[in-house]
Image (cartoon, helix red, strand yellow):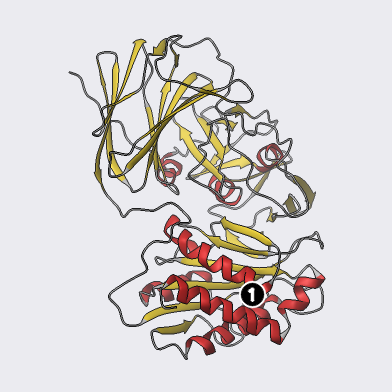
Amino acid sequence: MKKFVTVVFLLSLLISMFPGIAGAAEAPKLYLNGKQLASNAEPKIVGASTLVPIRTITEGLGYDVNWTSPNVTISNGDTNVILTIGGKTAVVNDHEVKLEAPALNNDGATLVPLRFVGEQFGLDVYWDADTRTVHMYQQNVSNPPVTEPGDGGNPAPPVDGGTDPGTGTPGNGDGGTTTPAGDETAFLKSIVFDGLGSIYLPYTGEIGDVKQQVLHSPERVVVDLPYMNFAADFSTGFTETSNGGKLGEVVVDSHPTLKKIRYSYFSDKPSTVRVVLDLNAPTNYQVSKEDHVIRIDVLEQTGPVTTDPGTPVDPPTGKDVFNVVLDAGHGAKDPGALSINGHQEKEYNLAITLKVKALLDKESRIKPYLTRSNDTFVELDDRAKFANDLHANLFVSFHANKTENATVSGSETYYYRSDSIPFAKVMHKHLVAGTGFRDRGVRQAAYVVVKKTTMPAVLLEAGYLSNASDSSVLFSDVKQNKIAAEIVAGIKEYLKLS
Ligand SMILES: [Zn+2]
């Protein structure tokens, strides 16, 4: 029995594993949702970073791209990203986001680091070294467990800001329904789960190297079988998708961490069958190839269970007092968003923070800590470090948003790590109750303060300062009191103190 274990490629490793070859190798190819992107501009490797043509990708996602030297503005009427050629930061809505390498102009095309593109536009990104190909798949951030990149049913990220850039997006939702390319050399006969922890994939013919990756939020293992298609008599049932693709799944209820096995015809370059293991916790696994059988063994759990979003996890227990960090966004030289009625975002952020603090000071089992308590400037990294050093139980960052479209209104709650989702859901419910604004949903974004903190962390975008109505509410003392009371109610509900 010949066994092999291949390396699991994580995005962070991947990017650093790109060789720093300039010009020598052929430029990487770009795929979005399983389709190759046609572009006049080629991706470029600079040092340890892969830079990709932003226009090609964001237009593929349905964004408008506008160029006013030296800035590039990318917008879908909802999310607004401003990049500056040569700049090491970008502005996403009103937030500054660091780039690992500066955006550059190459023959008229703006190239930006792939990692930034993935994080800001909600794409799962991975690198296939053999074919020098970058694969990008749209995530469904509002409902992570339901879809998988390439499963044929992957909708555009939820956008409800009065525009609907999701419709008609080229390449969207078809990743699993590609027409077979006819280059397969192997056929999968069935997918068999033994009820314990092993999955057997018997096949005929010869396959290429099995590709594996571990993805998070939600936790899953993705195994791609190149040069393979389903056999005509494949034994397990499929669901036909609306455009003729094939999807199937096996629901598992007998395993501590493996919850579902999904499979689809995933890509036609080359023909690839994708098998996804949906897990409820990080779990070791091993892929081995025996005589015309690929075997996937699901091994021991290596991290805490991340329950389904929406099912609040048990709050921290065994402590008498919970430390909660309140983070008033921006400050001093950094005003944040400018409101349509002449205020600055930093004023709202501090006002609401101080009101929440005053209420929490009355709570015997909660101790609030502030990253700033007056109009001072604190670096984003220092805000996260403050909470981490404190071993805080919860982190809440206060912000207000803006966009170029003055009609956009509503409250959003952001998280980054999946273990923050239950907290985000509770806080969002109370944020919307406090503002009374339109519910624009719980969303994932790689904001520094929710990414680098190590406890459940949320960033509350209470409303849009570019909207006259939202803005007047957010700067009203009476309304701020109501919002603050709801924030406190959310914290207490999550901590099961109410
Ligand atoms: Zn802000």
Relative side of 356 to 62, left or right: left
> Which corner quadrant holds the C terminus?
bottom left
**Amino acid at circle 1:** Gly
Q: Position of residue 248 (x, y in %)?
A: 46, 26
**Which residue is pictured at 55% across the width and 14% down the height?**
180
Q: How many marks?
A: 1
Q: Position of residue 326 (x, y in %)?
A: 51, 78
User: To which quarter of the image does residue 320 belong?
Assistant: bottom left
- In the rendered structure, the answer to whether residue 13 lies left or right of residue 301 reads right
| Residue 497 % position (x, y) | 41, 78
The answer, for residue 64, to whether it is visible in the render is yes
Question: For the view shown, which residue lies furthest in the left direction?
Answer: 1
> Would you say 488 lies left or right of 305 here?
right
Position of 321 relative to 101 (above/below):
below
Q: State the quadrant of the N terminus.
A: top left
Q: Residue at x 59, y 51 (%)?
A: 120
Q: Label 1: how many residues lie within 10 Å, few (<14), some (14-19) or many (20+)? A: many
Pick the residue in front: 106 or 64: 64
The one of 120 and 406 positioned closer to us in this rendering: 406
Above or below 391: residue 47: above
Estimate the x, y position of residue 138 in percent, counting from the top left.
Answer: 58, 40
Disc 1 element: helix
Residue that mark 1 sits on: 434
Residue in the picture at 79% in, 60% down: 404
